Image (cartoon, helix red, strand yellow):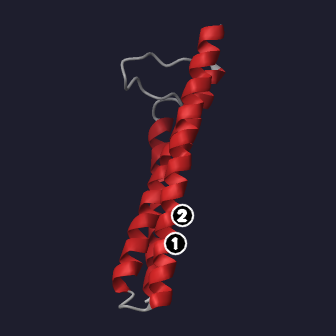
Amino acid sequence: MKQVLKNFGRSVACASITSMAYASTALAAFGGNLPDLNGVPNSTDPRDTITKILNAVLNFLALIAVVVIVIAGIRLIVSQGEEEQKDKAKKTIFYAVIGLIIILFSKVIVSLITNYLAAQI
């Protein structure tokens, strides 16, 4: 079972790396600039770029945390009553939820700082 979970983790990692490679190729078609997705024109302001990068990183980390929760849930189901395996899976879920909460607070902090800096200038 451990081998199956390791292989699944490797598959998820390879899929995420491949999708990032395709995303960079797709962005190269736009000359390196992001297309206008929200009706807001692209800006060259470094603060906007940094904010977009931080939000993208935090969104990716949230996705990783959700995947970890799913994997831990599978481990919990497959543990077949072994107390040690159940405890490991429960701890993993608990720490992943804590991570999601931290990511949420990080997004709020980034938003507040961005809005505060925008109001100052």
Q: Residue at x 46, y 89 (%)?
A: 83
- The x, y position of residue 68, in whole percent, is 46, 65
In the depicted view, which residue is nearer to us: 5 or 105? 105
Q: CA distance from mark 2 to mark 1?
A: 6 Å
- The x, y position of residue 21, in whole percent, is 50, 52
Few, some or many C-alpha atoms within 10 Å of disc 1 (few <14, some 14-19, many ≥20)? few
Question: Which residue has dot 1 on it?
Answer: 91
Along the horizontal axis of the image, is 82 left or right of 103?
A: left
Task: Give the number of the disc on residue 118.
Answer: none
The type of residue carrying mark 2 is Tyr
Give the answer, above or below, for where 117 lies relative to 26. Answer: above
Task: Give the number of the disc on residue 95.
Answer: 2
The type of residue carrying mark 1 is Lys
Instruction: State whether residue 65 appears in this view.
Output: yes
Q: Residue at x 58, y 37 (%)?
A: 54
- The x, y position of residue 121, in whole percent, is 65, 7
Please say if the residues under marks 2 and 1 sit with CB atoms less than 8 Å apart: yes
Q: Residue at x 37, y 91 (%)?
A: 81
- The x, y position of residue 2, in whole percent, is 48, 87
